[in-house]
Image: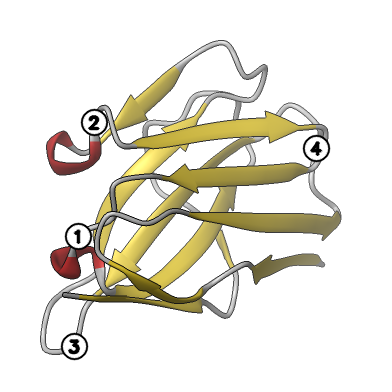
């Protein structure tokens, strides 16, 4: 069984920064691709960022490019979020998939952490 536990969410003013962490445990491989997704109230869950199993490749949603940075250290993935905007407000979910390629479906999900950006 795989467990993903997010932390680091909170309330921040526009222009501020937060760093989310996601610790993976269980039958997760160190070379598994991991990603961050988010869901705002009344909206569908959307992709935010992903990193390959080896950490050498990353991918971002256009709206967060240049502001968010995803990184990976063994079985922990981070999302550094700078220059936050009110539209970044959402529940952020960590996800993992067994392959090293970040394309494809994600099989494992965390419980989510709330990020609220005030204007």
Structural crowding at the residue carrying mark 3, measured as other residues with C-alpha within 10 Å and reported as few (<14), some (14–19) or many (≥20): few
> Looking at the picture, how far across and down is residue 18, in whole percent?
50, 57
Residue at 37%, 58% in the rendered image: 37
Disc nearest the viewer among 2 and 4: 2
Q: How many angstroms separate mark 1 from mark 2 (CA)? A: 13 Å
- Of residues 84 and 28, the one nearer the viewer is 84
Q: Residue 41 carries which label?
A: 3
Q: Residue 107 carries which label?
A: none
Q: Mark 2 points at which residue?
A: 65
- Of residues 114 and 48, the one nearer the viewer is 114
Report the number of numbered marks. Answer: 4
Q: How many angstroms separate mark 2 from mark 4 (CA)? A: 27 Å
**Extreme residue in the right direction:** 26
Give above or below for 57 relative to 101: above
N-terminal label among 3 and 1:
3
Which quadrant: the C terminus? Answer: bottom left
Kindly indicate whether the residue at mark 2 contacts the one at mark 1 (C-beta within 8 angstroms). Answer: no
Residue at 77%, 32% in the rendered image: 73
Label 3: element kind: loop
Structural crowding at the residue carrying mark 4, measured as other residues with C-alpha within 10 Å and reported as few (<14), some (14–19) or many (≥20): some
Q: How many angstroms separate mark 1 from mark 4 (CA)? A: 34 Å
N-terminal label among 1 and 2:
2
Label 2: element kind: loop
Label 1: element kind: loop
> Looking at the picture, how far across and down is residue 58, in whole percent?
43, 22
Q: Name the residue under label 4.
A: 29
**Extreme residue in the top direction:** 56
**Extreme residue in the bottom direction:** 42
Q: Mark 1 points at which residue?
A: 85
Residue at 55%, 24% in the rendered image: 52
């Amino acid at each position: 069984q795989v467990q993903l536990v997010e932390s680091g969410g909170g309330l921040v003013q526009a222009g501020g920064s937060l760093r989310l962490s996601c610790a993976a445990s269980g039958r997760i491989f160190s070379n598994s691709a991991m990603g961050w997704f988010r869901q705002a109230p009344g909206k569908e869950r959307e992709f935010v960022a992903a990193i390959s199993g080896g950490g050498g490749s990353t991918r971002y949603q256009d709206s967060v490019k240049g502001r968010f940075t995803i990184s990976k250290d063994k079985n922990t993935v981070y999302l550094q979020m700078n220059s936050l905007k009110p539209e970044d407000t959402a529940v952020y979910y960590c996800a993992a998939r067994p392959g090293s390629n970040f394309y494809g479906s994600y099989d494992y999900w965390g419980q989510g952490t709330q990020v609220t950006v005030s204007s």
